[in-house]
Amino acid sequence: METSSEKPPQNNSQFSSNSLIQDTSKPKTSPTLLYGGIAVIVLVLIAIGGYLLVRHHKHQIASTTPPSRQTSQNMQNITANTSPTPVISPVTSANVDQTLNNTDTTMQQSMNQVNSDLNDINNIDKSQDSTNNL
Amino acid sequence: MKIIQHLAVILAMSGTLFLGTALPVFAQNFGGQGLIRDVNKWQNQATKSAQQQQNELQRIIKRSDSLITTRLIRLTTLTTRVQNDSRLSASEKSSLSADIQTDVSGLTALKAKIDVDTDVTIARVDEKQIITGYYIYAMFEPKVRLLIVLNNLQTVTANLQALVPQIQNLINTLQSQGKNVSQLQSLLNDVSSQLQIISTTLTNDTNTIQNVSVTTQNPSATFTQVHQDIAQIVRSGFAKIQSDFSQMRPLFRQLILPNSNPTDTASPTGTSTITPTPTQ
């Protein structure tokens, strides 16, 4: 309240009118035009940046997609070339002959082992457990 | 009078001295010598007997050590046999190895006891325990080896039983294609039947063998029976299955080869054979 009473409005209007007079004495560069120009340049730069960004992104997507497909294809090829051999493969027309043949071999090997084991059992000297001589 | 008294005393003392020194001589000459001889003889006999007892104890300890060592060697060989078996499961190996280890520990402890035995009678009882407490040759080793055989046969049987439904699926597929599978079906039925008989026999025999212990009367009879089961039922059953397979193979070839098209290779369950995709 005291400040407004000390500085009358007339002094402010005089000061502003003086400053306008001083601006007109400088070279003719309109602030509106100056700010407008700057704004336009900024907008243009943003637009260019955005365009370049979008273009770069599109190019990146376009350039990365084919190798990805290629990798996938390679994996399929690897999978295809190394045919998996499951522990118990289903019996099919393609492998039934081999399966029966292998099974027959396995059975024969098992019976041979059984015969060997039974011979070992027969050869155990059970008289070693006699208590007659003690 | 006094002279007579003195003479009498002197005579009495002389007589006493004479008797004291001369009596042992008389005793030796007239019967005492035999008594001394007898005492000496008894003493010698006692010493000799003690020495004989000591010698016998050492013989028992030495023989016991030998008996235990040979048994421990058998058990070590048996452990190696179990561990190197390719068909026994981990649990079967663990169970059999634990049984063997129990006997190894028992015999080792018995050896330690016998080595410090001081009484022949106790040592003899301990020595007998090496045999009657374990019967390594007559009972334990045949038992473990038969269990190995039975477990192996059960594994093979289980694998064959897992194969049967897969072969059945293929037969069903061929039948759905209008093929005559009656012979194949008959052979597969026989395979299933044989496997069932084998499986039942093996299960019963395994239970019988597991119940054999040191208290079993005549375990040899049990072992002989299991031997016969393996020889007559299991072995002949496997032989029949092998024969069935050998007959099935040409039948499958006959049904499959003339129509070997891609759809034929598909199994009826939809799990087709894994075939490699051609490389592009």
Image: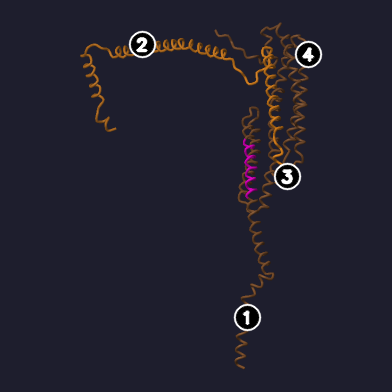
Chain colours: A orange, B brown
Q: Are marks 3 and 4 on the same chain?
A: no
- Secondary structure type for disc 2: helix
Give the residue number, with chain letter if any, for mark 3: A132
Circle 1 Cα neighbour tier, 10 Å, few/some/many (<14 / 14–19 / ≥20): few
Q: CA distance from mark 4 to mark 1?
A: 127 Å
Measured from the top left, where is residue B172 in percent x and y? 74, 14
Q: Which residue carries the number 1 mark?
A: B16
Extent of the magenta region: B58-76
Which residue is at 62% across, 87% downward? B8
Give the Cα distance between marks 3 and 2. Answer: 116 Å
Q: Mark 2 against mark 1, which lies toward the viewer?
A: 1
CA gap, disc 2 to disc 1? 162 Å
Q: Quadrant of residue A57?
A: top left
What amino acid type should be assigned to the residue bearing mark 2?
Val
Secondary element at tag 1: helix
Instruction: Please say if B239 is above or below B212.
Output: above
Q: Which residue is mark 2?
A: A44
Same chain for labels 3 and 2? Say yes or no: yes
Q: Main secondary structure of the magenta part?
A: helix
Reply yes or no: does residue B170 show up in magenta.
Answer: no
Residue identified by numbered label 4: B183
Q: Amino acid at mark 4?
A: Gln
On the rendered image, what quadrant is the N terminus of chain A found in? top left
Q: Are marks 4 and 1 on the same chain?
A: yes
> Which marked residue is nearer to the observer: mark 3 or mark 1?
1
Regarding mark 3 in the picture, which secondary structure is present there? Answer: loop
Give whichever of A132, A32 is nearer the camera.
A132
